[in-house]
């Protein structure tokens, strides 16, 4: 059989489990899609910036043409926003693409990547997809144990993945810890710092890692437009690193990996600070609302720096299914070795309320 002939390392990949789409649940339980609340994929409940919307309208006229493979205008915008050199930037079809390009450029059979227990599921996936070994380091209080991760480095290590904040635990390392870590990691090991949720951090906690690219030629920072910028459906993210790293990654990048609507929308969003600030403030208020609600229900949760929160319910599968029947989609995280937990994304006030009310009625009858 053809499929039997696929490499073992491919056949043993556990598929990524996405959040259940609203339309699918609507069909399954016969509920109107508008009555369903999806808090399962850390999407921005405010949608996208109005500036992105007009940029998309304008860019529609050129959809018959191939996109700019170099993302010229978007690159200029990133240069202006972050003060980096144009050749220090690579764009991806989502930041997942950046993670995959890093894996394809630096990993292969016989070498390994290091990542933390409970860290983002894409790190083991992209590692396995290229036949490399994943070295999973036990978490410390649900977060990255940088000391143990540094000790795990050996002659086969090529890439270390760090999510900060991490998904699904919401844990945050501070800048000093990451800086000290970079100091002791050999320069022939790529450190991928995945900052998908940085826009949700307060000013004092925001990452300064972009300033370290000149000092650490083995540092790759990945950012996304899927979360606070509200462009998850368009698929766009970017990586920042030394020109040498970017050059190698570009060898394996598809020439037109970022579509033209995504380029236009993201460039227009980048300077809409008021939209990002509204998204951040709404998220802070929603996090607070859900934390309060979980406390009232006596449910443990992991304090989160992201736009989601993981809470402990014990019989998570059962509660997940009962929430579905009430039209609330959250995310099971058993595949993150957290079988007792569910992750809920922060939504609009009303959505958070519906989630909490539904959860309350379920746990009260237990
Ligand atoms: C959501 C998320 C991303 C973003 O993925 P995209 O491909 O940019 O949509 C990246 N890293 C982590 C840790 C995430 O949770």
Image (cartoon, grey):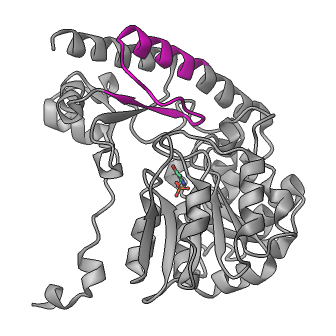
The C terminus sits in image quarter = top left
The N terminus sits in image quarter = bottom left
Identify which residue, 289 or 107, lies in the foreground.
107
Residue 157 in view here: yes
Q: Estimate the x, y position of residue 336 in percent, counting from the top left.
A: 36, 50
Q: Is residue 366 above or below residue 272?
A: above
Q: Is residue 275 left or right of residue 337?
A: right
Q: Estimate the x, y position of residue 100 in percent, counting from the top left.
A: 51, 72
Give the residues in magenta. 285-312
Picture residue at 54% right of the left edge, 23% below the top: 287
Q: Is residue 157 above or below residue 282?
A: below
- Location of residue 13 (image quadrant): bottom left
Identify which residue, 365 or 260, lies in the foreground.
365
Q: Estimate the x, y position of residue 176 in percent, counting from the top left.
A: 78, 49
Residue 58 in view here: no
Q: Is residue 178 above or below residue 70?
A: above
- Location of residue 33 (image quadrant): top left
Identify which residue, 323 or 79, lies in the foreground.
323
Looking at the rendered structure, the number of numbered marks drawn on it comes to 0
Q: Is residue 38 on the magenta stretch? A: no
Q: Estimate the x, y position of residue 203 in percent, counting from the top left.
A: 80, 34
Q: Is residue 308 on the magenta stretch? A: yes
Picture residue at 65% right of the left edge, 52% below the top: 195
- Location of residue 198 (image quadrant): top right
Picture residue at 54% right of the left edge, 47% below the top: 166
Picture residue at 29% right of the left edge, 79% below the top: 10
């Amino acid at each position: 059989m053809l499929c039997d002939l696929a490499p073992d390392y491919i056949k043993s990949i556990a598929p990524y489990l996405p959040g259940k789409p609203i339309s699918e649940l609507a069909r399954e339980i016969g509920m109107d899609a508008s009555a369903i609340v999806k808090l399962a994929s850390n999407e921005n409940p405010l949608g996208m910036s109005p500036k992105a919307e007009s940029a998309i309208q304008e860019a529609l006229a050129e959809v018959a043409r191939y996109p700019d493979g170099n993302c010229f205008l978007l690159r200029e915008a990133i240069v202006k926003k972050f003060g980096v050199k144009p050749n220090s930037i690579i764009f991806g079809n989502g930041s997942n693409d950046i993670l995959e390009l890093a894996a394809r450029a630096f990993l292969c059979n016989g070498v390994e990547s290091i990542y933390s227990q409970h860290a983002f599921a894409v790190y083991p996936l992209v590692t396995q997809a290229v036949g490399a070994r994943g070295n999973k380091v036990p978490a410390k209080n649900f977060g990255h144990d940088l000391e143990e991760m540094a000790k795990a480095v050996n002659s086969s290590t090529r890439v270390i993945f760090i999510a900060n904040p991490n998904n699904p635990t919401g844990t945050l390392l501070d800048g000093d810890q990451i800086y000290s870590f970079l100091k002791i990691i050999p320069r022939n090991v790529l450190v991928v710092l995945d900052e998908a949720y940085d826009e949700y951090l307060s000013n004092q906690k925001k990452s300064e890692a972009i300033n370290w690219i000149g000092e650490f030629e083995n540092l790759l920072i990945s950012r996304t437009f899927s979360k606070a910028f509200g462009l998850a459906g368009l698929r766009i993210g970017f990586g920042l690193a030394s020109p040498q790293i970017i050059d190698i990654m570009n060898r394996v990048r598809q020439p037109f990996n970022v579509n033209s609507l995504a380029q236009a929308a993201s460039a227009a969003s980048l300077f809409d600070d008021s939209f990002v600030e509204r998204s951040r403030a709404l998220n802070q208020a929603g996090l607070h609302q859900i934390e309060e609600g979980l406390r009232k229900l006596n449910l443990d949760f992991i304090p989160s720096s992201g736009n989601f929160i993981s809470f402990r319910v014990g019989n998570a599968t059962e509660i997940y299914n009962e929430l579905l029947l009430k039209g609330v989609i959250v995310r099971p995280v058993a595949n993150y070795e957290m079988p007792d937990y569910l992750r809920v994304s922060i939504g609009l006030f009303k959505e958070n309320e519906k989630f909490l009310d539904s959860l309350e009625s379920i746990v009260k009858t237990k």
